[in-house]
Amino acid sequence: MAIDGSGGDSGTVAHMTHMHVAGEIHAEAASPAPVWLTRPEDVNALTMKLWSSTTRRGEDGAIEVGGVRLTELAAQVGTPVYVLDEDDFRARARAWKQAFEGWTVYYAGKAFLSGTIAKWVAEEGLYLDVASLGELTVALRAGFDPARIGHHGNNKSVEELRISLTRGVGRIIVDSSDEISRLEELCAELGVKAKVMVRVTTGVEAHTHEYIATAHEDQKFGFSIASGQALVGMFRCHHSPYLELMGIHSHIGSQIFDTHGFEVAARRTLKLFAQFKEATGQEMPQLDLGGGFGIAYTKEDDPSTPENLAAGLREIVAHECRAFGLTQPEISLEPGRAIVGTAGMAVYRVGTVKPVDIGGGLTRRYLSVDGGMSDNIRPALYAAEYSAALANRNSAADPVVSRVVGVHCEGGDILVRDEFLPADVGVGDLLAVPASGAYSRSMANNYNHTPRPPVVAVRDGLITTVLRRESLDDVLALDAGLENEA
């Protein structure tokens, strides 16, 4: 029998599950649904915290965003496709800038970056953080002011450091002693001085998946505070004739919902400021608290607002500066997902529907769509949870627990592990996956020689191409063994 999988109260178990992105991968109860997934009263209703601000259902039940019906969009550009709500992106960028007035807000380009996005970021008055040669090149070719760019990366090449130095990038976040040496050699060669921040690991255990927690000691990023490496790196930059030490950079992880971890990180980084002042008689001018601010991927997720985060972080920084007798430095932070994540959705078309007996008289419905782990690897990489909705119509059918899976030759090719969808979802229907704007297209790949989907922006009923659809010829163009094949 097919099971509707009603879950009851989620309580503490659901809360703990969604503090950690990975969730409970293998837990199965007497229902195919996890305990946090509750049966909806109306399977057609949209939980708006998951969707961009202009998203709605039209009179016929088709989802609209930016004044564009997804049925019409799919007919014009095909599926799968990423859809960006331009008004929503811009509004979130402005909200972060306004909430943190007096601080510097960098958009974290690794979440998703293109020429169009770089221009939106510039137009909304934000700075831009890049973490690779490719991202740096996109920003520069889009005309982004280099002085408003921060350059990250734990193993920056000589080539990308040279570009940063010659183009006048505003700050370079150094991540190792080897990088400091590399940077000094380039500065000596070019006759320039680099503005740098030292990335430190604060030892904070962020409540998130291991792969996106970046401030604990046993990982690749930054100089350890606990071991003394951070102070050594700071003193080395301070005494270098080629470097201007601007301050400290800290990033504790991703998909974080509150300020508790930032409180510990601020205390430990500002203690470094005090130690540096005691040793040198000087105060460093800047502190970057990083990003990692979470969004809602499911109904159970409860992220904070920019306004609440700003109030909490301002209080934390002011308190710690008073405690250490410091003048408050210029503070910066780096939201990425929190701006672009909810502004984007992915749209797929259902190709097959397969009921699967999972034992105990239970059946799970597998809905195979025309995308998969090549366009959103997060569920396969660290079991990230997503939601989904029938996008092309309303349904009067009962909600049943379904699993949305992709086309790839992997058992872990899952896009939405558990969701209540109408029992009559069938071949040809459209499914929309909200909160797909961050770390979907930016982490997309060509597994199984699959072309990557396009990204389109919608606004006031118009569709604009952000990134065109990759063709099979694009994918095969690098294969030297096929050069003479038609």
Image (spheres, rainbow, N blue to C red):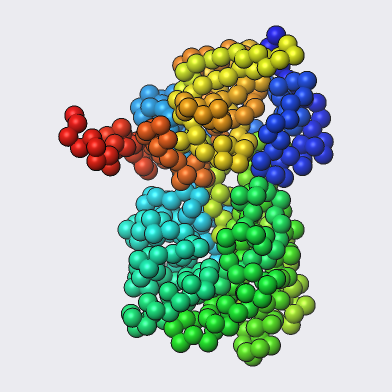
The answer to whether 327 appears left or right of 162 in the picture is right
Residue located 71% across and 61% down the image: 204
Q: Is residue 47 above or below residue 115?
A: above
Residue located 66% across and 62% down the image: 217
- Residue 448 position, x and y percent, is 41, 31
- Seen from the viewer's position, the closer of residues 374 and 138 is 374
Q: Is residue 233 above or below residue 57?
A: below
| Farthest top residue in view | 1
| Farthest bottom residue in view | 281
Quadrant of the frame with the N terminus:
top right
Viewer can see residue 69:
no
The answer to whether 138 appears left or right of 42 in the picture is left
Q: How many marks?
A: 0
Residue located 50% across and 16% down the image: 352
| Farthest front residue in view | 481
The answer to whether 219 appears left or right of 65 in the picture is right
- Residue 151 position, x and y percent, is 46, 65
Quadrant of the frame with the C terminus:
top left
Viewer can see residue 8:
yes
- Seen from the viewer's position, the closer of residues 103 and 429 is 429
Q: Is residue 235 above or below residue 336?
A: below
- Residue 380 position, x and y percent, is 56, 36
- Residue 16 position, x and y percent, is 77, 42
Residue located 46% across and 35% down the image: 374
Query: Where is residue 455, by image quadrant?
Result: top left
